[in-house]
Amino acid sequence: MIKRYAKILGSSKVTIACFFAAAILLLLMSIAQIENGPKGAAEEFAYNTFLYWSPNGVDLTIPYFPGGYLIAAVLVINLLCAIFFKIKRNGLSIGLCLIYLSVIILIVGDFFSHRNRYSSTINLRQGKQVEYTESSDKFELAIKDVNDAEKDRVYAIHDIMLRRLQTIRHPDLPFYVSINQYAPNSLIEEQSQGNSDISLFANQGFGKGVSINPIREATQSNESNKPSALITLFNDEGAIGSWLVRSNWDEQTFNYKGRLYSLELRPKRYYHSFNLELVDQQVPFAGSTDKTRSASLILSNGSTTQSVLLKPEQPYFYEGLSFHIGNQEIDTLKISVIRNPAKALLYWALAIGSCGCILYLGSHIINRFKTKT
C-alpha cells in the first residue's frame, strides 16, 4: 500500500505540475515586484505556504494558490519518492537520482538560508574598536542599567516580542515592561484631540504630546523602516510611566528607586568574538582622477591580531561572515556584513548535480553504443 501511494507521489506528472505551479508563481511574483519591490514580493509569494485574497470590507483571507513553501515541499516529497520507489538501480538511473538529490539540496538550502541568513552593518570610526554588527532590518528594545562605572548591563527585547505586544518580565529588573503599541514602520504626529485612549499616549520622555501613525513596511531596496513603540513600565503597585521610543531617537533616561536606566529602540545587535578597528582608509575626493577605495583594519579576537585590507572587489571572509566595504567618509567607514550558513550547500548541490549529469549522459552514450554494435 505504501509503495503504491509512493509511486503515485513520485510520478513525473506530479513533477511537471510542481514546475508548472512554480512558473505561475514566478510570473505573479514578478508582477508584484512593481508595487511591493523584490523583498516584499519574495516574502509574499516565495516564502509563504499559500497566497491569500481578502475581499474588500470583509475581515477574511481566502487561499487561492499554493505558495513557494508548499510547492517546494511537494516537489521534495515527489523527488524522494522517485528516488526510493520508482527509479531502478543502474548507471543511467543513478545519475538521475543524483540530479534529483541536487535539486532537493538546493530547495532545502534555500529554506535554511532564508531562516538563518542575515545582513548587518558595522559603523567604524578611526581608532575605535567595535565588537558587534547591527541588523539591516530587525530591531530590538534595549533597556540599559547604566549604574556600573565600567560597563552597562543591557536587556534586549526582540522585535518579535514587540510585534506580539507581550509583557516582559526579567528577574534582574525591578519592573516589568508592557508593550502597548508597536509599528514596524511609522510616522510621528501630534496627538489627536478626539482620541481619549490614554494607553496610546506617552507621559514620559521625548514622546509626550505625539502619537504613532503606522504605515506600510518598506519593500524597496532604497527604503528603510522606522519602527516606533509605546511601552509602559509597571511594578507591583501599578504603572511607573509610559514612553514612546523610535529607531532614530536618542536614548531616554529615567530614574527608578535611585538607579539610572535608559530606553532605546535600535537595530538588533549581533555580538561576535572579535573586535574591528579602523586604522586608515583611502577615500576618493571630488574631482580627483584616483577613484581607488580601500580601508585598512585590525581584527583581534583576544589571542591573535591580524591586518585586513578591504576593497570593493576584495571582500574579507572570517568565521562564516563576509565583510564588504560600504560608504566612506573622512574618519568613518560603513561595512556590510553577510552571514549565510547554507552557502556550502549550494556548492554541494552543484557538485552532486554535475556528477549526476556526467553519469547520466555517459551511461546513455554507452548504452546507445552497445545497441548499435
Image: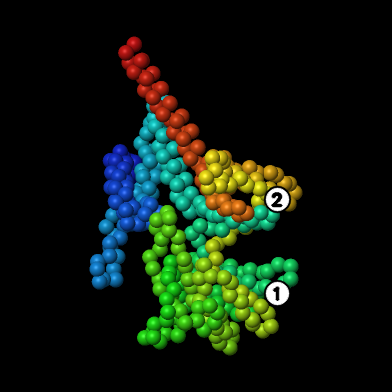
Judging depth in this view, the residue of 231 and 361 nearest the camera is 231
Mark 1 burial class by Cα count in 10 Å: few <14, some 14-19, many 20+ = few
Q: Secondary structure at mark 2?
A: loop
Badge 2 is on which residue? 301
Q: Residue at x 42, y 85 (%)?
A: 197
Q: Could you tell me how far apart the alpha carbons at marks 2 and 1 are, in whole angstroms? A: 28 Å
* Vertical position of residue 263 compared to residue 222: above or below: below
Residue, far bottom: 237
* Vertical position of residue 296 compared to residue 213: above or below: above
What quarter of the picture does the N terminus occupy?
Answer: top left
- Residue 339: image location, x then y, percent: 54, 49
Badge 1 is on which residue? 147
* Vertical position of residue 281 compared to residue 133: above or below: above
Judging depth in this view, the residue of 311 and 229 nearest the camera is 311
Which mark is drawn over residue 233? none
What quarter of the picture does the C terminus occupy?
Answer: top left
The kind of residue on which mark 2 rests is Asn
Judging depth in this view, the residue of 350 and 294 nearest the camera is 294
- Residue 145: image location, x then y, percent: 66, 73
- Residue 345: image location, x then y, percent: 50, 41
The kind of residue on which mark 1 rests is Asn
- Residue 365: image location, x then y, percent: 37, 20
* Vertical position of residue 165 compared to residue 352: above or below: below
Q: What colour scheme governs how the chains and residues are painted in the rendered image of this protein?
A: rainbow
Q: Residue at x 29, y 51 (%)?
A: 31
Q: Residue at x 30, y 38 (%)?
A: 12
Q: Residue at x 70, y 49 (%)?
A: 300
Mark 2 burial class by Cα count in 10 Å: few <14, some 14-19, many 20+ = few
Residue, far top: 373
Residue 305 lies left or right of residue 167; in this view the side is right
Q: Is residue 6 visible?
A: no
